[in-house]
Image: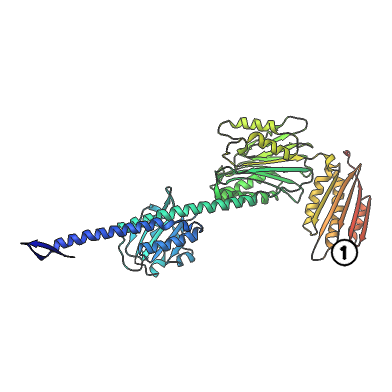
Amino acid sequence: MGLALLRLQGKPRRHTLSQSAMAVMLRDMATVHSSENAEARLRRIEAVTDTTLAHLGVEQLLRELLRRIREILGVDTATVLLLAKGGHHLVATASSGLEEEVRQGVRIPVGEGFAGQIAARQQPLVIDRVGPDTVRNPLLWRKGICSLAGVPLLAGGELLGVLHVGSLHPRTFGEQDLHLLELAGERVALATRTRQSRAERTAAEALQRDLLPSRLPHVTGMELASRYVPAEEAGVSGDWYDVFTLPSGWLCVAIGDVVGRGLGAATVMSRMRTATRAYALDSNDPGEVLSKLDRHIRHFEPDSMATIAYGMWEPALDRMHLSLAGHLAPVVATPDAEPAIADTPVDPPIGASSAPVPRKTSTIEVPPDSVVLFYTDGLVERRHRPIEVGLELLRETVRTESPEAVCAAVMASLIDAGATGDDIAVLAMRRQHPDELRSMHLEFPAEPESLAEIRAALRRWLPAVGASDDDLADLLVTVGEASANAIEHAYGPLGGTVEIRLEADEREVHATITDRGNWRHPRGQHRGRGTRLMRHLSDDVRIDHGAEGTSVRIRRRLTGDEVP
């Protein structure tokens, strides 16, 4: 290779090149060879995220990418540390050649150690000597790594984490190595962001579906209907609603909107829903419940904010107590008045203030046949019109009809063919007229926990058919005692159901409690007092035992001043 043929005086002769000419030729050839290798390696880098990896999850994808990066760069280890929630730590997520780092859950503070400095500066970094004074993670020098090169993982200018590679032999990572590593890092960051976004959206959608009621509860004396429409191509938001009853017979309604989108908003939404239910068990004052919720969010979710309307209906359903935290007031339609936006003070949103805020509760009378409509702002807000126009249109649409008809009319009136930019939640509630409540049928599992639900249903139904406070107290005891006897004596370990039928006839209430079990005789002394108490508090009690079960029939004359 170092020889050339020259012609001199017509005769060929061999001529040896000078050392300087030889060096130049070797350098040029090495450059060409190096360029060819670089182009080949670049092509392999381009293929790092090929379509064959499309089915893999984030961790599987990263492991495969790191395996390819090790091969392309000729290194012994390749590791990805992703930025944890909050942005203060890097967490070892995937590795090839240094799997212990992932299995041991290594966490590196941003700004500290090798990977932490890369994350803080968002610049590549190379070190030629690995030890306690240059890296934070002892696994790196215990593994015998001599040299490290790392780059930040950036997607759209946002830091996702750090990619670093290591060599078990002394190695000087040059500019070309760093260039290749940066190219690989760009593709890893892009693939990670795409996969994370897809996974987060799927998780957020699943969480939201699980938290929204699959069906609304059956509440004696109240009809319910709802609608939920997610925004088109805007990602999952934090809109939610909830309806639940308390052991005391109170009916609770919550509807809210967490600021933000994606999995973070859905997660805060789930925690708010759980906290609201927990605080509702301790208080019949919605303002107090929201004050506790605000304190909870400010302490445990300091970066979160949400609006919420929270209402509590008394057991008779004739009055609703309401508190608003930055949320739009519901529409109330009564048989004797035009529909109106509830005149209720609005306090600051949950989490909006750095200190506790006194929260107010308003009381709204709800006559029979009235409709109350709760909603989130996506229903009435549009870019092309003021919110006041949407609210007025909503007010004009709500009527004292069935909740299903109200929801259908509202959605048809306020939602046009254009794409909605926000989620929409609507919850309609109608208090039934006493004439619709002359009879009621209940069925519960034969277990002690059902007694609280039975009492709650009676607290709602009896006042609606004209029962006085004394009537209510006595019937709670008699029906409750008959139900408790069926739960205790009718069934064995396999359990069963208790059926309750209630009818209001003129000035009387008739209750029938039925089971389909085989009664066991009471054990122990001083039993049977419950039956004597039932007879004392009722006008008539009949107990019929048969082959197909037992029926207890109770008749109680109402003493209320006004009976529908």
Q: Name which quarter of the figure residue 518 lies in.
A: bottom right
Q: Quadrant of residue 168?
A: bottom left
The residue lying toward the viewer, choosing from 230 and 482, is: 230
Please name the residue that numbered disc 1 is placed on: 518
Name the side, left or right, on which 418 lies relative to 545.
left
Q: Nearer the viewer, residue 299 or 499?
A: 499
140 horizontally vs 13: left or right: right
Q: Residue 290: percent from the left, percent from the top?
A: 64, 45
Name the residue: 85% across, 49% down.
473
Place of residue 34 in the rendered image (x, y in percent of width and height, measured from the top left): 28, 59
Left or right of residue 367: residue 253: left
| Residue at image location 47% in from the left, 52% down from the top | 193
**The C terminus: image quadrant:** top right
The reply to whether residue 362 is in sight is: no
Q: Is residue 255 left or right of residue 218?
A: left
Q: Secondary structure at mark 1?
A: loop
Q: Where is 319 relative to 271, above or below?
A: above
Residue type at mark 1: give it. Answer: Asn
> Which is nearer the eye, 523 or 81?
81
Q: How is the protein colored in the picture?
A: rainbow
Up-down relation of residue 328 to residue 101 (above or below): above
Name the residue at 71% across, 35% down: 332
Quarter of the figure with the N terminus: bottom left
Image coords of residue 149 (percent x, y): 35, 60
Q: Is residue 344 above or below residue 173?
A: above
Q: Quadrant of residue 430?
A: top right
Residue at point 91%, 62% (across, down)? 547
The answer to whether residue 224 is seen in the rendering is: yes
Image location (x, y in percent) of residue 341: 68, 33
